[in-house]
Each structure stands twice: as C-alpha cells, then as structure tokens.
Image (spheres, rainbow, N blue to C red):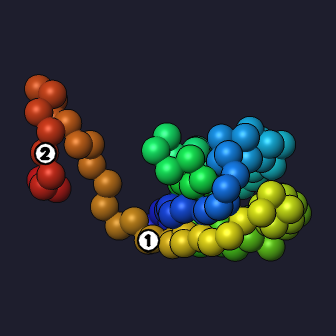
Amino acid sequence: MDRITLWGWIDFDGKDAAAIVRGATQHIAPTYDEQGCVHYVWTADPVQTHRVWVFEEWETVADLAAHLEGPLYRAMSGYLAEAGMTGAEVNKYAVARKAPVYDGSGVPRAAFD
C-alpha cells in the first residue's frame, strides 16, 4: 500500500509566516498523535517571508481522510483563515517507491536501483 504525502505552500501576504507557524504549533503538535501520521511539518520560507511550506506524510488514505474530517484539521483551517491566508497550493501524492538519496559510501544517487 502506498504512503500518502502532501506538500505545498500557503501565503499570507504582508504577514510574518514564521510567527504564523509558531502560533500554529497548538494544532501541529497534537496531529502527530493521530493514527497514521508520520510527518506533519510546517515551516516558514526563509526567503519569501510571507510563505509557509507544508509537508505531511500519512500511512494510508484512510488515515489522511480521518485527519481531514477531524477537529484538528478544522481548527487549523480556522486558524489559517484568521491569520489572513491569501493563497495556497497543497497537493497529495501516492508514494509507491522510497529509497535513500545517499548510498552506503555517501554518494548521492538519483536512480532507484
């Protein structure tokens, strides 16, 4: 079964994204306790200071669905709206293959072999 990853950006024009992420930790931290949550990382872009980058990883589609229907997701959505979200693009991906970038000798490799 494929793992599900989500990644993308959320903009807050004229706002300090780092402050918004710090305020969001009340919603981010408990999400790690939800079933199937592997990663739930939100970070401010160091160059585009109005942008937050989102990275999530879930064990299954059902786990992601439960999160999207749950109270933490609704609370985060409300928080982002109140913080002045002006745009977003977050996509989901089914991950069929996974391998380390660096081989045993520390050489980076793009191929899956």
Name the residue carrying label 2: 109
Name the residue carrying label 1: 94
x then y, percent, for residue 42: 61, 48
Res. 57 image quadrant:
bottom right
44 left or right of 22 in image = left
Residue appearing at x 63%, y 72% in the figure: 87
Res. 101 image quadrant:
top left
Where 107 sits versus 85, above or below? above
Badge 1 vs badge 2, beta-carbon distance below 8 Å: no
Residue appearing at x 54%, y 62% in the figure: 9
Specify few, some or many for label 2: CA neighbours under 10 Å numbering under 14, 14-19, or 20 or more: few
Q: Secondary structure at mark 2?
A: loop
What amino acid type should be assigned to the residue bearing mark 1? Ala
Who is closer to the viewer here, 60 or 74?
74
Whether residue 9 is visible to the viewer of this picture, yes or no, is yes
Q: Secondary structure at mark 1?
A: strand
x then y, percent, for residue 7: 50, 61
Residue appearing at x 74%, y 70% in the figure: 68
Who is closer to the viewer here, 36 or 57?
57
